[in-house]
Amino acid sequence: MPIIEMTEIKGNLSKNQTILGIDLGTKNIGISVSDFMLFSASPLTTIRHEKFTKTAGEIAKIIAEKNVGVVVIGLPINMNGTEGPKCQSTRDFADNLLQCDAFKEELNIVFKDERMSTSAVERVMIEGDLSRKRRKEVIDKSASSFILQGVLDRLRNL
């Protein structure tokens, strides 16, 4: 699983493959998936992040089920454009995935700047009058969908 650039995504997908979106948190990992036409992102699930091997196994299962060819991971860049400890933690997570035996197929990882993704999604949920409890249940997978949709929109313009 190499780390690739955004411009390399389409060249690294086979026919009918999808793209997986990941919003990595310290406790929860939001997961979303694209359709095979690469038009829209849909929130899929939230994985409770406890042990890496368990988390990687759950991600590998989703990758196999959804015919994923590229994984997009949100990179929590600081508002001033610098990378802090959270970015390093995200890069370490990706490196660990690259070395994980759970992935039988070669995949490619792309990082996507995720500044303001969670707050943008939460703002929409508040405007939609979702309860605090419901927002908490869906915020992570919705944020991953927001990140992935940004990638899909950019791919159409490349």
Image (cartoon, rainbow, N blue to C red):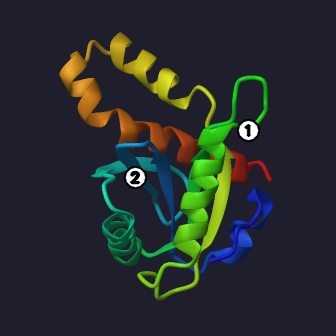
At horizontal 54% and vertical 69% (from top left) the residue drawn is: 96
The label number, if any, that marks residue 36 in the structure image? none
Q: Residue furthest bottom?
A: 104
Crowdedness near tag 1: few (<14), some (14–19) or many (≥20) residues, C-alpha within 10 Å? few
The label number, if any, that marks residue 83 in the structure image? 1
Instruction: Point out the image quarter for the N terminus.
Output: bottom right
At horizontal 30% and vertical 55% (from top left) the residue drawn is: 50
* Residue on which disc 2 sits: 31
Q: Earlier in the sequence, mark 2 or mark 1?
A: 2
| Image height of 6 relative to 40, above or below | below
Residue closer to the observer: 139 or 15: 139
Contact between marks 2 and 1 (CB within 8 A): the answer is no
Residue closer to the observer: 38 or 148: 148
> For the residue marked with disc 1, what is the amino acid?
Glu
Q: Position of residue 4 (x, y in %)?
A: 74, 66
> For the residue marked with disc 2, what is the amino acid?
Ile
Left or right for 95, reference 157? left
Q: Position of residue 76 (x, y in %)?
A: 62, 38
Numbered disc total: 2
Q: Where is residue 38 in the image (x, y as percent from the top left)?
A: 56, 59
Q: In which quarter of the image is residue 124?
A: top left
| Image height of 30 relative to 4, above or below | above
**Mark 2 element type:** strand
At horizontal 27% and vertical 12% (from top left) the residue drawn is: 129
Mark in front: 2 vs 1: 1
At horizontal 60% and vertical 80% (from top left) the residue drawn is: 14
**Mark 1 element type:** loop
How many angstroms separate mark 2 from mark 1 (CA)? 23 Å
